[in-house]
Image: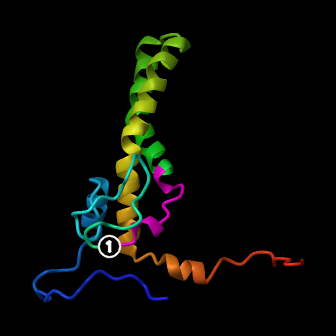
Amino acid sequence: MTRWEPDRSAPADSTTPATSAWTMVSRGMRNRCPVCGEGKVFRGYLRVVDECEVCHAPLGSLRADDLPPYITIFVAGHILLPPVFWVEKAWMPPMWLHMAVWLPAFTIACTLLLRPIKGGTVGWMTRLGFDPQAEAAHPPPGPPRADHA
């Protein structure tokens, strides 16, 4: 199995540096292919395309797993918790009012942040050179399988 590499058949321009990690993350956050910047990362709300339609980067084989939700909760909490504490300290509203205001606010914030954060994670993983074939060839150690018929 060979590792996927972008097409380098075009003449190399020595003045053009390699794509930076920030560029790949920002492309992913904008739903653009981290490699070429033209294709799309998602084919739904959070479903990653199998491969870029422009450069054929195998984006679908990258598994972001739980990192995007963790980052989303972290960011949403840092954005919304200070106002929650300020409102509580200033006016001490009843708990039902907190729930009526802040639960929808957190839900909306997490829904809006999750997709760009997942796209950025895919861009970051692409920049790090994640190789899904290498991971499949060397599975993590675990208990031996009993293949008895």
In the rendered image, residue 57 lying in the magenta stretch gets the answer yes
**Percent coordinates x, y for residue 13 in the rendering:** 11, 86
- Location of residue 69 with respect to 107 vertically, above or below: below
- Location of residue 69 with respect to 14 vertically, above or below: above
Magenta region's main secondary structure? loop
Q: Classify residue 122 as left or right of residue 6.
A: right
- Location of residue 7 with respect to 94 vertically, above or below: below
**Percent coordinates x, y for residue 31 in the rendering:** 29, 54
Q: What residue appears at the point 29 percent right and 64 percent down from the top-left corner? A: 33
Give the mark count: 1
Q: Classify residue 123 as left or right of residue 97.
A: left
Q: Quadrant of residue 49?
A: bottom left
**Magenta span covers which residues?**
56-68
**Percent coordinates x, y for residue 132 in the rendering:** 50, 75
Instruction: Please give the residue where the numbered disc 1 appears in the rendered image.
Output: 56
Q: Classify residue 139 as left or right of residue 29.
A: right
Instruction: Say which amino acid is labelled 1.
Output: His
Q: What residue appears at the point 41 percent right and 45 percent down from the top-left corner? A: 114
From the viewer's side, name the closer residue of 44 and 140: 44
10 Å crowding of disc 1: few (<14), some (14-19), many (20+): some
Q: What residue appears at the point 89 percent right and 77 percent down from the top-left corner? A: 149
Q: What residue appears at the point 37 percent right and 71 percent down from the top-left corner? A: 126
Report the residue that reaches farthest toward the front. 149
Q: What colour scheme was applied to this rendering of the protein? A: rainbow
**Secondary-structure class at tag 1:** loop
Q: Quadrant of residue 9?
A: bottom left
In the rendered image, residue 145 lying in the magenta stretch gets the answer no
